[in-house]
Amino acid sequence: MRSFLLSAFAIALTTSQASSADLYMKYKLYAVGLPIGSGVLNVDLDDTSYSIDASGGTAAFGKLVSDGKGNVSVRGDNTGGRLSPKNFALDVNSEDETGTITMQMRKGALKKVAVNPPQDRMNERIKVTKDHLKNVLDPLTAAVFPAPKGLAKESCNRTLSLFDGKERYNVHLSYKSKRNARTADGRFKGEVLVCRARYEPVAGHRPKRKTIQELAKNKSMEIWLAPVGDKPFLVPLRASITAPFGPLVVKAEKYKLSK
């Protein structure tokens, strides 16, 4: 569950009130068609900087998803439409995982990371090296796609090199199609890009772990990307994957531009 949500660009899951952010989005999470969580994403973008905030929670779904809540934020530089994270913070509290992660980054390189509590089973994990941490993004910054060509195929075709403070992984995206979509509130209605997504573990993970192996082999992951007004960026409107227990879907139900 955690790996999927991070790979799906850290769309956090809980309810919240709309803020004065440039873009406010509210999401719902569904497992086999049943609502088990909801969430918000607030994005602020200006000519030199950006900030993204999200907070989240899920309801128990059998033995597959536990009760939990959390929040995540990132601040960084916007240089000609390229986002470069500087300060990232994650706080999670659930039956499966409780703790905090903070990272300081500069120009795509990790400068400092603090994980509390520390990871366990380190002897079973592939070691994260300095080379792994060059030209990386945090998973929340990766939720906002620089897209100078808008809804062109090129905006899908890319590889995201991500580090969440514990694990280093890639998300390979490729163009699938375009389609029309809308949010339940009707504030977004228009064309979106549909991208295939594939998860590739790199380091920090336990390679013998079944869930990691299954996720790496899974070819069902899909992301729908929508414009952020007239800004040269795209954001996920929907993310989905077919898990062993059935479909897992995160989709935006509210979309509000303040500028």
Image: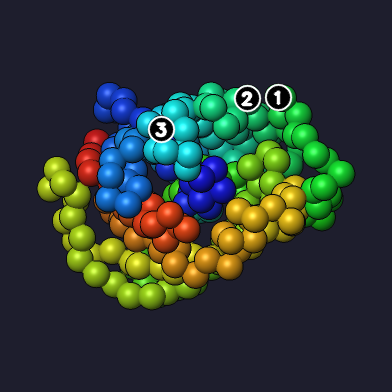
Q: Nearer the viewer, residue 151 or 195?
A: 195
The quarter of the picture where residue 40 lies is top left
Of mark 1 and mark 3, the one earlier in the sequence is 3
Of mark 3 and mark 2, the one earlier in the sequence is 3
Could you give the CA–CA distance between mark 3 and mark 2, rounded to whole angstroms? 19 Å
Local SS, label 1: strand
Kind of residue sitting beneath label 2: Gly
User: Where does label 3 land, which residue?
Assistant: 60
Residue located 74% across and 56% down the image: 208
Q: Nearer the viewer, residue 253 or 187?
A: 253
**Contact? badges 1 and 3 (CB < 8 Å):** no
Local SS, label 2: strand
Q: Is residue 210 left or right of residue 146?
A: right
| Residue 5 drawn at (x, y percent) | 49, 46
Kind of residue sitting beneath label 1: Asn
Local SS, label 3: loop
Q: Residues within 10 Å of mark 1 (few under 14, many from 20)?
A: few
User: Where does label 2 land, which residue?
Assistant: 99
The quarter of the picture where residue 110 lies is top right
Question: In the displayed structure, would residue 147 be above or below residue 68?
Answer: below
Could you give the CA–CA distance between mark 2 and mark 1, rounded to whole angstroms? 5 Å
**Contact? badges 2 and 1 (CB < 8 Å):** yes
Q: Is residue 193 left or right of residue 88?
A: left
According to the image, what is the colour scheme of the structure? rainbow
In the rendered image, is residue 6 in sight?
no
Could you give the CA–CA distance between mark 1 and mark 3, rounded to whole angstroms? 24 Å
Q: Quadrant of the C terminus?
A: top left
